[in-house]
Image (cartoon, rainbow, N blue to C red):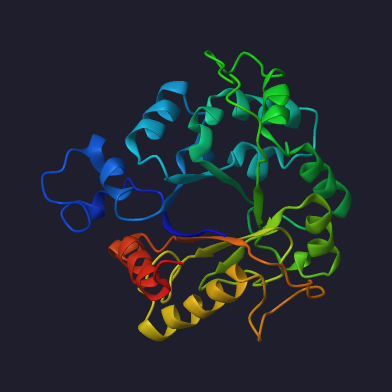
Amino acid sequence: MTVRIGISGWRYEGWRGVFYPKGLAQRRELEYASRQVESIEINGSHYSLQSIKSWRAWHDAVPDDFVFAVKGPRYLTHLLRFRDEKAVPALANFFASGVLALRHKLGPFLWQFPPNYRFDAERFDRFLSLLPSDTGGARALARQHDGRVKSPWFAAHGDRPLRHAVEVRHESFCTDAFPAMLRRHRAALVVSHAIADWPYAEDVTSDFIYIRLHGAQALYSGAYADKALDRWAQRVRAWAAGGEPADARRLGKAVAPRVRRDVYCYFDNDQKVHAPFDAQRLRERLGAA
């Protein structure tokens, strides 16, 4: 069981001189941030294909026991929406770009769908079926890349499982069929807290929990109050111990307790520099979990 509290992204101009020490070179910001929190979501991979040079640089900048979460391409989740023949090569390009070069520092993949994406059981089941369950499957998929990847990289560094978490933002997902589908594919439902009209659910659908905290006062803004962080600390403890919060909000049925679960929690209230400090405050409450 591992509990990792982190932040979503690290390259924000407004953080300089506040979270980052004044005068810190931009190229050293990841190095610094990775010594202040335990995990970071890589956001750049959501907006464009990254190069093997970037993946290697990120791997080398952080401590050996650090873990990244990697955000899947919006080209797949927001544009193609996994609904045509372009989905497989696009997914192959992502895995051929060099993400596996993170090696043991590679944590869960985050697949975030837009607010206007409705639940379509057949299409969503196909999407989940395409996601590789281990690094061997990721390498096999990567071999189907096309010419958009100029320097493909998917060398073997031992096989291990891969984890996937899904964040949805349309009310049509509020059906017990959705968490049941996630369980069949062993994908986690993202516990997504936001001041927005998005569905909120805490169904346990995998052997790990993935939490995203988008802000307490406005979307992507507002520090979490002490009382709110106390509540999140209690929930993290319950999930990590293999149970569920007593007041868990679920779309489907509860699951049987297990010995332990890994928990990943990311603060996305990056505006006004709340995220890194809230992450540190939550970690203080959890101690050496």
**Nearer to the camera, 287 or 26:** 287
Q: Is residue 246 above or below residue 60?
A: below
Residue 120 screen position, x and y as percent: 83, 54
Report the residue at 66% width, 48% height from top: 164
Residue extending farthest left: 23
Residue 228 screen position, x and y as percent: 44, 82
Q: Quadrant of residue 184?
A: bottom right
Residue 153 screen position, x and y as percent: 55, 18
Residue 59 screen position, x and y as percent: 41, 33
**Nearer to the camera, 199 or 96:** 96
Q: Which quadrant does the N terminus fall into? A: bottom right
271 relative position to 144: left or right = left
Report the residue at 54% width, 31% height from top: 99
Q: Is residue 213 above or below residue 19?
A: below
Report the residue at 64% width, 65% height from top: 260
Mark count: 0
Report the residue at 59% width, 38% height from top: 73
Residue extending farthest right: 122
Q: Is residue 24 above or below residue 189?
A: above
155 relative position to 286: left or right = right
